[in-house]
Image (tube, rainbow, N blue to C red):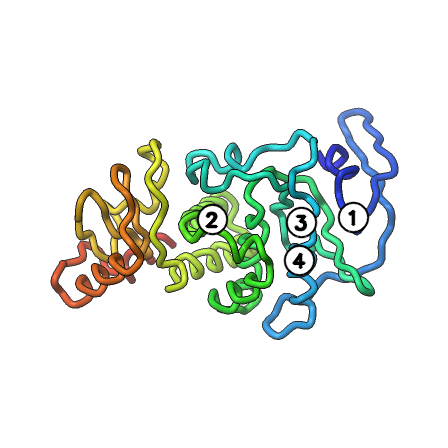
Amino acid sequence: MEARVNPWLPDTAPRLRWVVESEGWLALGFDHVEGRHPDLTPGSDDLPAIADALTGLSQGLTPCPPVRVQPATVRWRNRIAPDLIDGQTLCHTDVTPLNFLVGPGVVRLVDWSMPIRGAAWIDAALMIVRLIRAGHTPAQAESWADRIPPWKQASPEAVGVFVSALAALWEQRLREYPVPHRRQLAEAAQAWAASASTMRPLAEAWAWPSAWPLFDGDEFGICQHVHSGRRIGAVGLLVSRRRRPQSHHRVRRQHDRCRAGRHRPPVSRTEGLRRLR
């Protein structure tokens, strides 16, 4: 995959020089570049440069080059409605700080082994989880991402769904292989999903009845107040399979009535989040 994508990447990417395949092994040779991994902690001088790099990549790789890569709609199938993440940008998706090299006046993103074609804001969203892991609050991480135009322009509904799906995915990966860095990323994704900044109405429902088993209102709910076929779900998210979603303000009013005792929550917020962990 990386050999296929490399010719289409911006000049900041190290160029592929040779490919050797023998006895089941594949070796790729790239230009040597100097650089260090960035510091993602709050207040780091590297943060603006990382935002600028992701902005440049989203601009330079839209529309997606004519190279065969997996669509985001396929990678996130059964987790996110296709129309929410579909797009024409070549995204990296593995934005660990170990894949950034910071040099004099340039930030390079390497290891393009997991690219997708999808919405231009996806890499910025994935980077937010890395920043939370590095010590940012969800609000601070989102404020950083506002430097990146595709993120700033992203649909709140699409982002809300993506955040919750990401939290569920990292939890699944942690169960499959419980290593420390996966636990940290799972906790970071859960913190973002649980933050007040993600209390956004979701987009209209899709036709997969089991698409959200971890966030089904029958099991988890801050307030399982049924109104016109809608439920307020585990982290203040709104899911509907039949009708248009309610406005953010209406969701907030229903959540406030729940907290005031007018609608009895079957599962407390604390208990719901504990189950998610």
Q: Give the labeled residue for mark 2.
A: 166
Q: Which mark is residue 13?
A: 1
Kind of residue at badge 3: Gln
- Near mark 4 (Cα within 10 A), the count class, few <14, some 14-19 or many ≥20, is some
Where does residue 41 sit, x and y in percent of width and height? Answer: 61, 70
The quadrant holding residue 50 is bottom right
Q: Label 1, label 4: how many angstroms apart (C-alpha)?
A: 15 Å
Kind of residue at badge 1: Ala
Circles 1 and 2, Cβ within 8 Å, touching? The answer is no
Of helix, strand and loop, which one carries label 3? helix
Dot placed on the residue nearer the N-terminal end, 1 or 2: 1
Circles 2 and 3, Cβ within 8 Å, touching? The answer is no
Name the side, left or right, on which 63 lies relative to 104: left
Q: Label 4, label 2: how many angstroms apart (C-alpha)?
A: 18 Å
Q: Give the labeled residue for mark 4.
A: 97
Q: Which mark is residue 59?
A: 3
Kind of residue at badge 2: Leu
Rendered view: 135 above or below 246: below
Report the front residue among 54 and 16.
Answer: 54
